Image (spheres, grey):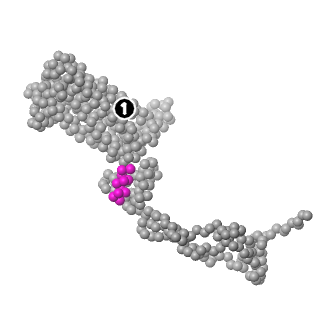
Amino acid sequence: MDTIASFFSFITWPVSWVIVQFHKVYGAIFGADTGWAWGLSIVSLVVLIRICLIPLFVKQIKATRAMQTLQPEMKKIQERYKNDKQRQSEEMMKLYKESGTNPLSSCLPILAQSPFFFALYHVLSAIATGKTIGVINEPLLASARHAHIVGAPLAAKFTDSADKVAQLGASLTDVRVVTAVMIVLMSASQFYTQRQLMTKNVDTTVKTPFMQQQKMLMYVFPVMFAVFGINFPVGVLVYWLTTNVWTMGQQMYVIHNNPTPGSKAQASYLERLHKHVTHHGKTRNRREKAIVKAIVAKGRDRNEFERKFINGLTKAGLAAQSDGTVIKGESAAVVQTEDGTVTTTTAAGARRQQPKRQSKSQRQSGSPKAAGAGDIEQPPSLTKSEPEAETKTGAPRDTPPAAAKKPDSKPGNGSRSKAQSGQRKGPQRPKSPSKK
């Protein structure tokens, strides 16, 4: 670890300078030689670094979601070229280039803060050996060596001997208890952060090897931190525990406000958004407008939770627009009056009446429809004249109307009306003689 830290010695001066500046502020409040002053200086260093890394964190989120989207295509490429590794790599790079994604983007925050981590380790190792480093001179070195966090010196390790711990003014039991507790908290925070990501913010509709790898890392990373943590000084454990807590809180914020499409977190978020929009009748801020705009733009590609959200707005009489706004739509309410007429009332107040439905007996008897709203009259061009009807039935044109007897049919008797001439339309077949 010392050899690796020496590679980042070029950044020890800025890291030590930032720690000293924070130490001046906290030293005036808690005392220059206290563990609170030096411990909070390390915590403030972490916060400052993580604030500077927020753009990289946003890029990491976008890259992770893009990789999740590409997993089905990547799986097809692996199956198609499973016997040709070179062609498989070429197709993978082509897919990354076309989609504009980079697999290394998801590792940018860890890679970016690694130099600061090893530089801090180099600074604390120099303090443990009594050497000045960076802007930490002799007085500051003596102050840092006397600083203890809950009885453990900043530069002490779990694997240190009793004599070395005694030189720093502490007992071996206190150092091992404090470091063990911090290692457990560091591993637990790492496990919870990864588990929260896998259970809430992963698209459950896509089953790919990427998800299995993430589940494996959920158990591997905490074990790695526990193994390597016994070789970290207390100050480095403070640094790493702080950055884990920051990552956990940052991820909770992202999951709550900008979840991955298709995940359980998105279902919860859209439920909350639906309640807010239906209560206020509009989207309240730019973030909500951006979410609604993205859902509307998907069209038929919406997932189950997004379709449920759009349908819920429609039932509430609202309509989502392409610009992310929500307006009042036409929610139809169907009302049936006392006389049986069905009336459709829209939000604009317009009424549209539908004709009264006839009974089965009225339809069979051919009786005229009851006069009412919605009756549709046939145009004269569609009605057949009486002479034409008689010509098709075979009756002469000069036959008086009285010769064509109209059968008596009562509505509701269930019998079908007979033809006026007693015969079917068109040419008739001669009847065969009855057999005796």
Q: On screen, 413 above or below 27?
A: below
Q: Residue at x 54, y 74 (%)?
A: 373
Position of the N terminus by quadrant:
top left
Magenta stretch holds residue 274? yes
| Residue 274 image point, x, y percent | 38, 53
Q: On screen, 114 above or below 159?
A: below
Q: Residues within 10 Å of mark 1 (few under 14, many from 20)?
A: many
* Residue placed under numbered mark 1 in the picture: 218
Q: Write down the quadrant of residue 375 in the picture.
A: bottom right
Magenta span dominant secondary structure? helix
| Residue 250 image point, x, y percent | 29, 41
Q: Which residues are magenta?
A: 271-282
Position of the C terminus by quadrant:
bottom right
Q: On screen, 407 above or below 109?
A: below
| Residue 96 image point, x, y percent | 40, 39
Q: Amino acid at mark 1?
A: Met
Relative to residue 219, is residue 185 drawn left or right? left
Please identify the residue farthest to the right as the structure is shown.
436
Q: On screen, 106 above or below 386?
A: above
| Residue 120 image point, x, y percent | 20, 29
Q: Residue at x 67, y 72 (%)?
A: 411
User: Total marks drawn?
Assistant: 1
Q: Write down the quadrant of residue 321 in the picture.
A: bottom left
Q: Write down the quadrant of residue 419 in the picture.
A: bottom right
- Judging from the image, what secondary structure is the residue with disc 1 in? helix
Q: Residue at x 88, y 66 (%)?
A: 433
Q: Nearer the viewer, residue 81 or 302?
A: 302
Relative to residue 431, is residue 321 drawn left or right? left
